[in-house]
Amino acid sequence: MAQDKSPLMETLIKIQDTTANPAPLGLMGFGMTTVLLNLHNAGLYSLGTMILAMGIFYGGISQVIAAIMEFKKNNTFGLTAFGSFGLFWFTLAFLIIMPAMGWGNAPETPAMVAYLVMWGIFTGVMFIGTLKLNRALQVVFASLTILFFLLAIGDGTGSVVVTRIAGIEGIFCGLSAIYAALAQVLNSVYGRTVAPLGVVK
């Protein structure tokens, strides 16, 4: 029996994705801002407008843009990670800005500990997702999980030593994100593996 060739037959259309990879932008925004904030935590300089500006514009807006682009690529992990951490930088900046402008009181120590612990739990769960991705992202999310809990301990105990250790660990975390970002850029430009990401098979 001949097949039905009527116009009502379903037609499969494959649409090629020609958009750029947004992950390097998001990772760079996160990585550079994290390094600069944790240079402060390590005791190299005081908290000032440089960190706030980086947090809002590069750490915040760049990751939100990356999240929107990941949404278009149907990447749930990228959308959730970049969207969440982009908005994390906004919340962190406004925790400082709002009390200075008279928009409520600065958070008490238990509130900041709860804030950091919740972000640590979220990051830990996201780390589980990276086990299906690549080694570079595993390092970023594992070190970030540790960072949040170290900062929570530092805030909760008031220990300068723990905060300094967190700063050093946070610098490593930020640099690992910068590596993951620039590796993807270079690999894309050269069309081969220039900097390995440790792809999980």
Image (tube, helix red, strand yellow):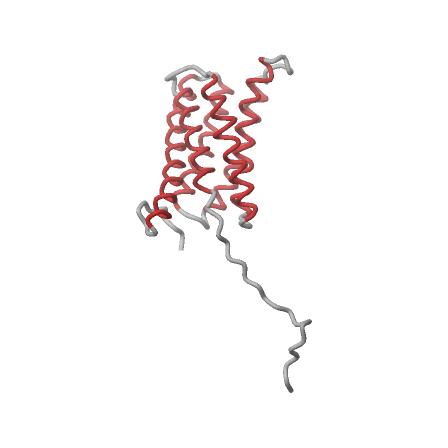
Q: Is residue 179 above or below residue 75?
A: above
Q: In the picture, residue 12 is in which quadrant?
A: bottom right
Q: Residue at x 33, y 52 (%)?
A: 192
Name the quadrant of the N terminus.
bottom right
Q: In the picture, residue 136 is in which quadrant?
A: top left
Residue 3 position within the rendered picture, expressed as x and y whole percent measured from the top left: 63, 81
Q: Is residue 188 above or below residue 53?
A: below
Residue extending furthest toward the front: 7
Q: Is residue 104 above or below residue 178?
A: above
In the picture provided, is 68 more to the left or to the right than 190?
right
Q: Using the image as rendered, state which of residue 177 and residue 125 is in the foreground.
A: 177
Q: Residue at x 38, y 28 (%)?
A: 171
Residue extending furthest toward the left: 194
Q: Residue at x 54, y 62 (%)?
A: 14
Q: In the picture, residue 24 is in which quadrant?
A: top left
Name the quadrant of the C terminus.
bottom left
Q: Using the image as rendered, state which of residue 53 and residue 42 is in the foreground.
A: 53
